[in-house]
Structure formats: structure tokens, C-alpha cells
Image (spheres, grey):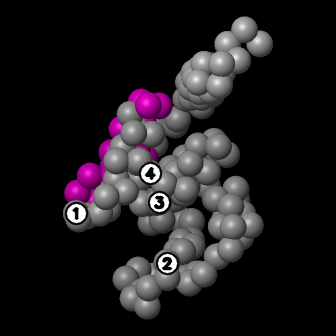
Amino acid sequence: LSQKTGLKIIYIHSGFKKPIRATYIRSAGPEEFVGYIVNAKYIITNSFHGMAFSIIFHKCFFVGLLKPPSQVNCRLENILDLFHLRNRQIVDGRNDFVDQGIDYIAIEHAIQREREKSVNYLKDVLGLQNE
């Protein structure tokens, strides 16, 4: 993606390996982490929070699932499925939808539906349905 776009890579990773040519950030606090996402043209992540903030800020993003025995992939997959974003998944190191945008209008509608379902559920369990 960097070769195609000419954009530099900012790699947030706590490890010591430097597998690609990039600017490495070993530790980013919450404000700095979100700042990198807000200012990015593209995000490539394997993090639930990286994907969630990418969606919140309407960014073009791609997700690589973690290798087994990781048990956090289900959160990533649930969001991808909920918002019909499986085409953002990196499979075998590839994604053929780099030039395809994301329909954030549809996603915002889906978020609103999910928010309403959550509020209704809470009202129901708390006995506040008539309010």
C-alpha cells in the first residue's frame, strides 16, 4: 500500500523486531494512538480498537486477523460482519479492495440501529420500557 500510494508507514508495535521500513512507535498513549488514526490516510490493523476508531473517524482501513491461538479475532469478525465490511479483511497478506471506499452513510445507519437496540434492551432489563 505504501509503495502504491507513496505514503510513509507509522508502525505502532511494542516488539523489538522491525520487519518493514517504517517509523516505529513502541508506545503510544490513548491520545497519541487516536491522533495517529485521525491523521492517517489508511489504517492497517489487527487491533479491535484500531478498527473501532477507524470506523468512528470514517477512515479507509484494512484488518488482518491474528494467528491462532488468538481469541480476539471474534471481536474483529463480529464488527466486520455487523457492518458488512468483510472486504476490508486482509487474507493471505492481500486485499484486492484497496481502491474501494467504505460506505460510511450505511455504517452510520447501522450504528444508529444497534444503538437503539442497546438502549431498548437496557430499558427492558431495568423496567423502564414506558419511559
Q: What residue type is labelled 2?
A: His
Q: Distance between the residues labelled 1 and 4?
A: 19 Å
Q: Mark 3 points at which residue?
A: 47
114 left or right, relative to 97 = right
Q: Name the residue under label 4.
A: 62
Q: What residue type is labelled 3?
A: Ser
Residue 112 in sight in this render:
no
Q: Which of marks 2 and 1 is nearer the N terminus?
A: 2
Asked whether disc 3 touches disc 2, contact meaning CB atoms under 8 Å apart, the reply is: no
Q: Name the residue under label 1.
A: 68
116 above or below 18?
above
Provide the secondary structure element on which disc 2 rests: loop
Residue at image point 58% right, 43% down = 55
The residue nearer to you, when weighing 32 against 98, is 32
Residue 52 percent coordinates (x, y) = 56, 48
Q: Earlier in the sequence, mark 4 or mark 3?
A: 3
Residue 56 percent coordinates (x, y) = 65, 43
Q: Which of marks 3 and 2 is nearer the N terminus?
A: 2
Residue at image point 74% right, 67% down = 31
The residue nearer to you, when weighing 46 against 39, is 46
Q: Distance between the residues labelled 1 and 3?
A: 15 Å
